[in-house]
């Protein structure tokens, strides 16, 4: 750490200050289980292997098999790519802690990891929304499905997802660089997350907190509401189908997507609420919810879609 240096715009700590200005962060493994980290690494390593093999296989099969180059599977390939990216910026850091006790990250490394984790997180949220729209069109307008979701439309949806995500995520690392970190440099998770980082700052984080909340609400919050709206419309269409068998067949096409929605959004909503508005809880709660949100979907999404999709 550095004493008596300026850290952030207009913030200066005197040389005789008892506060330390940190220049690195320390990520945390699983609190209280440090002595068995090497054994804990085994299931996490297995999960990482399943994630890599599962998502790469899905992308390869869809891109090579021409019969699968339709909207539903193209969105699935996007989801697999997003899951793969998210896992590449979370699992290696955790395994480094478990195997090598490599906990120290520079500000630049931490902010870079945070940027990519939240970027792929937003990608996944938007892709799940696009998949909900795909299911709505397929069930409510089956005769016009191919004319509505053309390759051109899918490309525009993909471009819109990238533009929206980068627009809200690029400012975050730059806003963090104006802060001073002198309370502590120990993060509560095994990777760098925006709400976790700003809690360590001893300078004003009002702008960061407001912008961070805006990002969450305007991306994943809005996506979740639109997904719910899509399923209300889908349910309305399904209930209008006369035959019981037809209802079940229509709903069966949504089961994999519903699983993806539950796996992704449930831990994320709980974690966001607890970080911003909840009481101070034991660190195990935050760590468990974060791991469920960032690690479980990339592992289970390929399994769910392979099991439920006969074509793949």
Image (cartoon, rainbow, N blue to C red):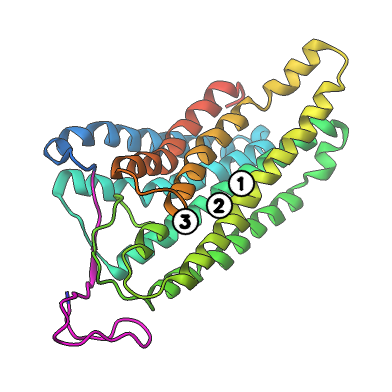
Q: Main secondary structure of the magenta part?
A: loop
* CA distance separating discs 3 and 1: 14 Å
Q: Which mark is residue 123?
A: 2
Q: Nearer the viewer, mark 3 or mark 2?
A: 3
Q: Which mark is residue 2?
A: none
Label 2 environment density (alpha carbons within 10 Å; few <14, some 14–19, many ≥20)? many
Which disc number belongs to residue 118? 3
Q: Residue at x 31, y 50 (%)?
A: 189
* Extreme residue in the top direction: 244
Q: Are marks 1 and 2 in contact (CB under 8 Å)?
A: yes
Q: Quadrant of the C terminus?
A: top right
**Per the image, is 242 magenta?**
no
Q: Quadrant of residue 105?
A: bottom left
Identify the residue at horizontal 50%, vertical 51% (top origin): 121
Marks 1 and 2, how far apart in space?
6 Å
Above or below for 119 versus 243: below
Is the residue marked by circle 3 packed among few (<14), some (14-19), or many (20+) residues within 10 Å? many
Q: Please name the residue that numbered disc 1 is placed on.
A: 127
Q: Earlier in the sequence, mark 3 or mark 2?
A: 3
Instruction: Give the magenta range.
Output: 2-29
Q: Residues at badges 3 and 1 in contact (C-beta under 8 Å)?
A: no
Circle 3 SS class: helix
């Amino acid at each position: 750490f550095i004493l008596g240096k300026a850290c952030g715009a207009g913030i200066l700590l005197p040389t005789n200050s008892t506060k330390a200005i940190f220049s690195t962060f320390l990520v945390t493994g699983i609190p209280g289980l440090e002595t068995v980290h090497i054994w804990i690494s085994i299931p996490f390593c297995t999960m990482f292997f399943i994630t890599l093999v599962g998502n790469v296989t899905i992308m390869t099969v869809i891109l090579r098999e021409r019969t699968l180059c339709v909207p539903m599977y193209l969105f699935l390939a996007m989801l697999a790519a997003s899951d793969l990216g998210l896992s590449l910026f979370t699992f290696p850091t955790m395994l480094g802690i478990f195997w090598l006790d490599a906990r120290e990250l520079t500000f630049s490394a931490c902010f870079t990891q945070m940027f990519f984790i939240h970027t792929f997180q937003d990608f996944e949220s938007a892709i799940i929304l696009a998949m909900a729209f795909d299911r709505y069109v397929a069930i409510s307008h089956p005769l016009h499905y191919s004319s509505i979701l053309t390759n051109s439309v899918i490309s525009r949806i993909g471009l819109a997802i990238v533009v929206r995500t980068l627009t809200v995520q690029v400012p975050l690392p730059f806003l963090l660089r104006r802060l001073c970190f002198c309370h502590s440099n120990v993060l509560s998770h095994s990777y760098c997350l925006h709400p976790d980082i700003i809690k360590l700052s001893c300078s004003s984080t009002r702008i960061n907190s407001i912008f961070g909340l805006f990002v969450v609400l305007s991306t994943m919050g809005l996506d979740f509401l639109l997904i719910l709206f899509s399923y209300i419309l889908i349910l309305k269409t399904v209930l209008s189908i006369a035959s019981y068998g037809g209802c079940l067949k229509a709903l069966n096409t949504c089961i994999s997507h519903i699983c993806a929605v539950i796996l992704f959004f449930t831990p994320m909503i709980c974690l966001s609420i607890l970080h911003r508005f909840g009481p101070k809880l034991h660190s195990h709660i935050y760590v468990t919810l974060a791991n469920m949100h960032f690690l479980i979907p990339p592992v289970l999404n390929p399994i769910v879609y392979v099991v439920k999709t006969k074509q793949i």
